[in-house]
Amino acid sequence: MNHLSRISSAVIAATVFVAVSPSQAQDYPTKPIRIIVPFPGGSGPDVDTRGVAAELSKVLGQPVVVENRPGASGTIGLEAGIQAAPDGYTLVVGTPTTLFLMPRLSAKVTYNVDRDLVPVSLMGYLNTALLANAAMPQTDAAEVIAHAKRLPGSVNVATLGVGTHSHIAGEWFAAESGIKLNFVPYNTSNPFVDLMAGQVQLLFDALPASMGNVRAGKLKIIALTGKSRHPNFPNTPTFTEAGFADFNPIAFISLLAPAGTPKPIIETLAAGVQKAVTMNPALIDKWRSNGGELKATAPDEFALFLKAESAKWAQAISRANVRLD
């Protein structure tokens, strides 16, 4: 977006903001709410958001519709959310890739999260796993590191695209452990097929997309993030146990609104998410079985969370020395 367009968008946003009267904010919501997911249908963020959206609809008494706007590692969808009218009826899902990684990795990204978006609430987070082909002889992080040091560049690591959470998490681990890994981006295709076939050996990712193959014995979990072992994975060691206490690239989904959205609407949405994530025991168990937790936050608390996560990923990117353009 050029400078003139951004000024125009700001003027439009300000006009809409003025048009939202206190009574309208008090009566909110009176029509369906749209949540833009900046990733394809069937992806982890999409599936996870739909589960929360279904519960949020029950709380707010209006349909909550998920709209997929994938492309450019999530930045197209986030831009669409930023440009929407700030009236509470269009929200956008934020992830580490869209909020922290792409703005730092690509000069083509013109949005500013602090300026252009208002935090609503965290919806849930997932620990990051180091996944491996089941036939790979290494069984823990220390053995993977030793193998990579013996044969530098011989270990192929799939990623969900250059600059994504899975890629930068892998770069972060390589920098922390002093090893060289060969990253193979899968921008539009499914990396799990090649991971199970042994064409790539490793993948850093949250667990929902892989748990079926883990349970079937086609993939295995080498290590999980977290200060202590996850209760659903008591036999899986943590990266902390391997000596990497500072390696903690968690994945999360969160809800944000365009800048200018009235505070009463933000508070209504945040309170709605707080109820939504506690209503469905089956959904709660599903998240825990995938190594995560449904978790809502007040807007101010969520803003502090974003600040801390942003600083963490900035350091990881700096150490990895990665740029997209």
Image (tube, rainbow, N blue to C red):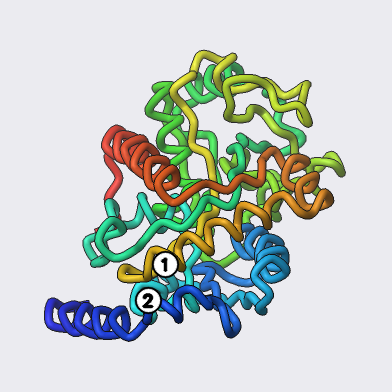
Mark 1: secondary structure: strand
Q: Quadrant of residue 309?
A: top left
Q: CA distance from mark 2 to mark 1?
A: 7 Å
Using the image, determine if residue 141 lies above or below residue 44.
above
Neighbours of disc 1 within 10 Å: few (<14), some (14-19), many (20+): many
Amino acid at the residue labelled 1: Ala
Expressed as whole percent of the image width and height from the top left, the position of residue 146 reads 54, 17
Residue that badge 1 annotates: 257
Q: Looking at the picture, does residue 174 appear above or below residue 200? A: above
Q: Earlier in the sequence, mark 2 or mark 1?
A: 2
Judge whether residue 239 can be spotted in this image. Answer: yes
Q: Nearer the viewer, residue 124 or 261?
A: 261
Residue at image point 45% right, 72% down: 71
Asked if residue 189 lies left or right of residue 178, the reply is right
Say which residue appears at 39% left-offset and 63% top-offset.
263
Q: Is residue 321 left or right of residue 42?
A: left
For the C terminus, which image quadrant? bottom left
Q: Amino acid at mark 2?
A: Pro
Question: Which residue appears at 44% of the width and 23% of the height?
Answer: 246
Which residue occupies the foreground of this view, 101 or 112? 112
Image location (x, y in percent) of residue 42: 67, 67
The answer to whether residue 175 is above or below residue 296 is above
Whether residue 73 is visible, yes or no, is: no
| Residues at discs 2 and 1 in contact (Cβ within 8 Å) | yes
Q: Which mark is residue 86?
A: 2
Q: Position of residue 245 (x, y in %)?
A: 48, 19
